[in-house]
Image (cartoon, coloured by chain):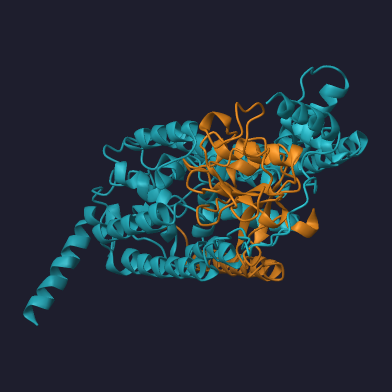
Chain colours: A orange, B cyan
């Protein structure tokens, strides 16, 4: 080795100095961000007030079966006999037959409430729902807007960048903290 | 039946003028008298935070174990087994999110966006491998990163890549890092996550185009060791720089190098540096002149690349959703686009002023202008420094693992005859006692 001893020492000194500077730098990043750090993890959620039920949720999720499902705020529901989320635009008849239904997978269950005469309860059969939002659009346009889409956190992989959020035309996707993972519609918020 | 259609048509005329998204109490909820119990919507909980901390702890444990295996134990087989375990835990079990590579963007976003607070676990995922790199070299690449492990598994017939091609292709990773930070800092997109080639393998579902890209990477990876790590990984770029000055690092031989050249071709990633030859006085003078020219070229390169980055702002800023929306609205307003899109009708339904949107988009474009200067300047600096380093004289008397390029995989250990002598000695000592 052609270098003399002093040269090596100088090189080592510079290297050690740079090393310490880098460690301090990492520490500085930690310090600067720790004030802004949130102890909670963040999760993706749809703001139902902004959602336009375009149907992208059904197709853009990285999961084969979307993590987005329809949710029903029963307190807002009118329990109508003719539900605009349940029936297609021109039903042949007012009954549960598949050709009358708006939902492409028949995921809405329509139940006649025996004792309360003209009322019908609508529930979502979640394993069948694919989050296309057809019923949401129908209910919002003509009804009370009690049906809305939500990211179901038992299914969501919580990708760092949600691919539905990228495709969302109305910017309805938000990062929400873990203690409030749902943005539900409520009767008083309508 | 006909009456029903009339009702719908009537309702449509009445109600379509009012917005779509908000709900109305058009049909008052009934007062139930028969004791009907109204269900409430279920809200299944997300993954508990405690599991995120467990992930961070697993990361720490695997990093520590990997450091021990690489620097003390020196056994390729054990390192490989550990990397397979990481592949299954961080890759297939945790399905790839969140990883340190993607965490670069969360950190960049939280620095520039005051509304976004990076979760502590993501911070830990970003920092921990960097701290380990400062101490032990690129241990994370060796046995922790699932993206590296999946490429290591398919590496069958490694061929060597010429030095000039390697450096040239690596430039892409620098550009990728700078672009990822630019787009994350402006809140436009997380491109590292969007173009992660292996995530669809980990999840066994995902975008078809990305799956094809992943297959291509794995196919190329059969003949060229870890193409993503060497030519694309933005986190690898940060670790390269830190591992240059790491306290401890991989040594090919446990003893003195005897220059037997046995390890020369053992590294599939071209990270082994051969002893240097002495320069002749002519070479020395030629390179001295070149160095002066290159140092003078540095500010020119930085400035011109920065200007290119600045001039590209109409293109780069289109990654931001607001700018894209403003573009679309502008085309519609000026009659250049006939049909409305979901995005533009959603914007019009909000009732916001078009002029406000334009102003907002222009602000974002100005941000991209400044970001473009930094982005381009960084790329120019990288090119200039690479050229300068090429004309500097290096002195090496032994075969060494390159400080920056060594992925600490440990393949070279077994090629060193000194290693075998040492192991034999150790075994004999154990047998005797």
| Residue positioned 75% across, 37% down in the render | A141
Q: Nearer the viewer, residue B16 or B264?
A: B16
| Residue positioned 28% across, 68% down in the render | B73
The relative height of residue B53 versus residue B368 in the rendered view (above or below) is below
Side of B79 relative to A173 (left or right): left
Q: Nearer the viewer, residue B214 or A185?
A: A185
The relative height of residue A93 versus residue B352 in the rendered view (above or below) is above
| Residue positioned 43% across, 59% down in the render | B140
Image position, residue A78 (x, y; %): 72, 49
Quarter holding the N terminus of chain B?
A: top right
Q: In the displayed orientation, state which residue is furthest to the left.
A: B432
Side of B432 relative to B83 (left or right): left
Image position, residue B87 (x, y; %): 37, 54
Image position, residue B63 (x, y; %): 41, 66
The relative height of residue B131 versus residue B241 in the rendered view (above or below) is below
Mark yes or no: residue B280 visible: no
Image position, residue B287 (x, y; %): 56, 39
Quarter holding the C terminus of chain B?
A: bottom left
Side of B400 relative to B206 (left or right): left
Q: Exactly how many numbered labels are in the figure?
A: 0
Residue B321 occupies which quadrant of the picture? top right
Q: In the displayed orientation, state which residue is furthest to the bottom.
A: B433
Mark yes or no: residue B134 visible: yes
């Amino acid at each position: 080795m052609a270098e003399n001893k002093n040269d090596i020492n100088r090189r080592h000194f510079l290297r050690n100095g740079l090393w310490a500077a880098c460690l301090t730098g990492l520490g500085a990043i930690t310090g600067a961000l720790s004030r802004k750090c949130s102890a909670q993890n963040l999760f993706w959620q749809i703001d139902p007030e902004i959602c336009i039920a375009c149907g992208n949720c059904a197709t853009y999720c990285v999961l084969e079966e979307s993590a987005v499902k329809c949710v029903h705020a029963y307190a807002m529901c009118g329990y109508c006999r003719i539900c605009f989320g349940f029936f297609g635009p021109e039903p042949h008849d007012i009954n549960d037959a598949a050709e009358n239904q708006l939902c492409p997978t028949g995921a809405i269950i329509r139940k006649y409430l025996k004792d309360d005469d003209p009322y019908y309860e609508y529930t979502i059969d979640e394993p069948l729902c694919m989050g296309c939002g057809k019923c949401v659009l129908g209910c919002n346009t003509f009804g009370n807007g009690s049906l809305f889409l939500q990211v179901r956190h038992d299914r969501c992989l919580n990708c760092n960048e949600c691919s539905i959020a990228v495709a969302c035309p109305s910017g309805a996707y938000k990062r929400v903290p873990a203690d409030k993972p749902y943005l539900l519609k409520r009767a008083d918020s309508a | 039946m006909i009456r029903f259609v009339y009702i719908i048509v009537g309702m449509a005329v009445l109600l379509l003028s009012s917005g779509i998204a908000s709900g109305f109490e058009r049909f008052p909820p009934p007062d139930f008298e028969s004791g009907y119990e109204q269900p409430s919507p279920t809200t299944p909980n997300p993954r508990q935070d405690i599991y995120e901390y467990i992930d961070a702890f697993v990361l720490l444990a695997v990093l520590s174990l990997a450091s021990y295996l690489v620097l003390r134990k020196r056994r390729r087989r054990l390192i490989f087994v550990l990397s397979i375990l990481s592949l299954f835990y961080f890759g297939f079990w945790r399905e790839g999110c969140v990883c340190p590579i993607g965490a670069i963007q969360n950190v960049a976003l939280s620095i520039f966006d005051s509304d976004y607070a990076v979760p502590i676990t993501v911070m830990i995922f970003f920092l921990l491998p960097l701290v380990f790199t400062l101490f032990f070299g690129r241990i994370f690449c060796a046995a922790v990163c699932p993206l590296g492990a999946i490429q290591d598994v398919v590496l069958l017939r490694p061929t060597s890549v010429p030095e000039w091609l390697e450096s040239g292709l690596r430039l892409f990773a620098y550009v990728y890092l700078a672009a990822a930070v630019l787009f994350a800092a402006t809140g436009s997109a997380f491109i590292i996550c969007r173009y992660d080639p292996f995530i669809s393998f980990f999840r066994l579902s995902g975008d078809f185009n990305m799956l094809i890209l992943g297959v291509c990477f794995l196919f190329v990876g059969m003949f060229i060791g870890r193409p993503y790590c060497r030519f694309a990984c933005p986190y690898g770029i940060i670790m390269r720089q830190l591992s240059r000055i790491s306290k401890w690092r991989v040594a090919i031989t446990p003893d003195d190098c005897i220059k037997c050249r046995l390890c020369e071709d053992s590294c599939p990633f071209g990270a082994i540096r051969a002893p240097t030859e002495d320069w002749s006085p002519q070479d020395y003078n030629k390179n001295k002149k070149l160095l002066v020219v290159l140092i003078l070229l540095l500010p020119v390169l930085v400035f011109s690349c920065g200007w290119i980055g600045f001039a590209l702002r109409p293109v780069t800023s289109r990654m931001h959703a607001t700018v894209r929306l403003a573009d679309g609205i502008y085309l519609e307003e000026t009659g250049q686009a006939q049909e409305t899109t979901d995005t533009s009708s959603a914007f019009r339904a909000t009732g916001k002023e078009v002029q406000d949107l334009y102003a907002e988009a222009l602000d974002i474009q100005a941000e991209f202008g400044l970001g473009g200067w930094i982005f381009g300047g960084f790329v120019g600096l990288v090119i200039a420094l690479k050229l300068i380093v090429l004309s500097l004289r290096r002195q090496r008397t032994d075969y060494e693992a390159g400080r920056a390029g060594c992925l600490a995989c440990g393949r070279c250990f077994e090629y060193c005859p000194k290693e075998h002598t040492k192991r034999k000695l150790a075994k004999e000592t154990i047998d005797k006692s």
